[in-house]
Structures are given as C-alpha cells and as structure tokens.
Amino acid sequence: MPFINDKLKYYADERNRKEIEEKQKVPDVTDSPADQPIRKIQTRYRFDVEEVMKRLRKRILGQEHVLKNIENMLKIVWADITDSDKPLHIGLFLGPTGVGKTEIVRVLAEAIHGNRESFCRVDMNTLSLDHYAAALTGAPPGYVGSREGSTILDKEKIEGSYSRPGIILFDEIEKASPQVIQTLLNVFDNGVMTIASGEETIDFRNTLIFMTSNLGTKEIQSFADNKFAFLAKQAIYFFNPGNWGKRGRETVLDHLIKRRLESSFQPEFINRIDDIITFNWLERQTLFEIIDLLTEQINRKLLRYGCQLELDVSAKEFLVEKGFDKKYGARTLKRAVRKYVQVPLAELLIKQTAREGVSYIAQRSIAGIEIKIMHTI
Ligand SMILES: Nc1ncnc2c1ncn2[C@@H]1O[C@H](COP(=O)(O)OP(=O)(O)OP(=O)(O)O)[C@@H](O)[C@H]1O
Ligand SMILES: [Mg+2]
C-alpha cells in the first residue's frame, strides 16, 4: 500500500517540520525578555529579607512603623541598587530609653550574621571629648596617649563580607564631639575612613550604619504629659499656612524633633541621613508580649534542666504592675522579671528541688510570685 505509507510519511515529516519551525520561531513582542520575570535572580546578598523580618517581628514588639521602615531598607539593600560609593544605609533611631533601639540592631545582626554581637558598637559618650576622637580614627603618629594607628572600630564587623553587609551602631550620637561628627560626615560622603596612620582604610560601602539618640525625648514626654499643651501646639502648627497639607503623627512631633535635631547638628549632617525614625513608648499591652518573649527565653535555658515554666495571668499582671514605667521602658520590666521570677527559679534549681520532666507555674502570691509544680510533662 504505497499510497498509505506515503501519506503516513508525509504527516510524520510535516509534524517534524512544524516542531522545528516552532523551536526556531523568532519570539513575538509578548515573548520579549522584558515581559518575562527574571527567573534566576542574581544578587550578591545571601540573606532572605522575609526571614530577617520574621525574626525581627517576633523579637521587637510595639514598633511596627520601625519594622516597616527596616523592611523597606532591607529590600533596597538586597536588590543591590543603591549608590555604590556610599554606605548602604544611614539611619537614625530616636526615642525614649529601653524601647528597642539597640535591640533591633542586635536582632538584625543575629538574623544576618547568626550572632547578635556581630556588629561594631561605638559609644559616643566615651568619645565626647575632642582628644578622645583620636580613638575613632586612630591616633596620628607621635600623638601621646593612644596607641598609634589603632582604632576602636572593628574593621571586620564594619566591612561585612561579599555576601553579607557589615553593621555599625553609633550610640548616643548627640554626645559626639564636632570633630567626630566631621569624621562621620566624610564617611557618609565617601564611604571610606582613613585611619590616622594613613596606611589603613576602613570601607563603609558595604555597611548599614545606625545611630541612636535620646534627643527630642523631653519634647515627646512633655507632649504626652500635657495633652492640652499638645493640642494647643498642634493648633498653632496647623494654623501656620506653611504647614498646611501635612498630616497626623508626622506633623507636630516630627517638626519638634527636627527642630531639636537642628539645634544639635549641622544641616549637612541631618541631610545625609537616609531615615530618621522615632520609636514609640512601650504600651502596657506590649509589656505582656515582652513577658511572653522573656519566658520563652527562660524556657530555652531550662531545656538543659529538663523542666519548663509558665506564667499565669495573675503573675503577668503583677510583673506589668511592677515593670510599667514609661520613662525606663522595658528595662524596668526586665528587672521585675529578674527579681520575681528568675531569682526564685534559680533558688529552685540551686537547691535541686526542681525536678526533671516537670512543668512549673508562676502565680501571684502575697509576697510576690510563687513558683509551683503544675504537672509532669
Ligand atoms: N520593643 C521591644 N520589643 C522587645 N523587647 C524590647 C523592646 N524594647 C526593649 N526591649 C528589651 O529591653 C532591653 C533594652 O532595650 P534596648 O537596649 O533596645 O534599649 P534602647 O532603646 O537602646 O535604650 P537606650 O536609649 O537607653 O540605649 C532589650 O534588651 C530588650 O530585651
Ligand atoms: Mg541603646
């Protein structure tokens, strides 16, 4: 049956031809690379923004606006599309004491480098006198009192690695001397610091720079203490035509804080900061969440002893009562947890009356907090 065989061969050839044609087809407009998502993303950074944020959200409470800001910053850094001659980010954290300004940097270091101490911390208080400023950049040759060329800066932690950014925190920036601020201005501009010996440089172009300050806290406090004065200032602020069009929280407070900053720093300095963020005071509800976080940390340590601890509502309320102090933030709460939970717990462990496989419960008692056996695990 040559006829049928010819037909079959014809169809087979035709199919082949079509397949080859399909493969060789010049892509039309909708197939152009611009319409396709980038499948293999090539970024040098080996940290996952979502994972970092998950950790931060678990550990930093009551500061959602700060976290949102950090998330945006991390996205930009991860995508690696910032100016490559400058530090990756320059942020200033403002706000009261004990509300998470330093803690957020610690958790960020832990999430990016796996260690909460993997950042360089510079306490500006210790550099407040001009001649101590030498400690930042290293003393010039022949300078008395400081080791030549040595600096308090930790080069490794600042420079990070090719795939992970370095982190530095300048605490209490308002205490820095004008000379130190000048040094920082140069770093912000050029991304590099030359150590006074002239031989070594520290590269800040792969660095997240954070600064903290309590500046403006008094202003915020006086607002919080006197709502009437707050409203009066708000009204004055709104009636000033120059301020029309601005809205909400950002208005009076930001304006006041900015004015306070301007009275302490030159405009060039403020101008080079990417983000200025004010932390909130911790609310009562946030303290309950922090207690849960602290209990979780205690329980991680208790794993070694094979027992666990729970706090009932009465114990938590007692701790919040003792530890709610707007002026000192979470530090007062941590002290209360130490005194009323960690001390009796430690006593149990020392006396070896704590038993393995037991779940303990902390409850309010007349004397404070009592720890009792709840059940066996
Ligand atoms: N928002 C928060 N969420 C969870 N824990 C917090 C928060 N704020 C503070 N803490 C706890 O309180 C401790 C002290 O906070 P932190 O060191 O961040 O204070 P700070 O804001 O830097 O204050 P200061 O201006 O005095 O340095 C932290 O180690 C942490 O355990
Ligand atoms: Mg701090």
Image (cartoon, helix red, strand yellow):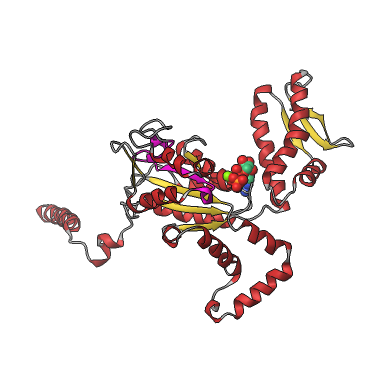
Ligand 1's image quarter is top right
> Would residue 197 be visible to someone looking at this image?
yes
| Residue 297, image x, y percentages | 64, 35
Left or right: residue 240 versus residue 266 is right
| Residue 51, image x, y percentages | 49, 45
| Residue 193, image x, y percentages | 34, 44
Left or right: residue 190 versus residue 274 is left
Residue at figure coordinates x 28%, y 36% from the top left: 199
Q: Is 246 inside the magenta-drawn segment?
A: no
Q: Is 171 inside the magenta-drawn segment?
A: yes
Residue at figure coordinates x 73%, y 34% from the top left: 338
| Residue 252, image x, y percentages | 60, 69
Q: Nearer the viewer, residue 361 or 152?
A: 152
Dividing the picture into quarters, in which one does residue 335 lie? top right
Q: Nearer the viewer, residue 139 or 115?
A: 139
Q: How many marks?
A: 0
Check the image and report above or below for 88 versus 197: below
Left or right: residue 197 versus residue 19 is right
Which quarter of the figure is the C terminus placed in? top right
Check the image and report above or below for 56 versus 279: above
Q: Nearer the viewer, residue 228 or 5?
A: 228
Q: Which residues are magenta?
A: 152-176
> Would residue 60 be visible to someone looking at this image?
no
Residue at the limit of the structure toward the top, as seen here:
352
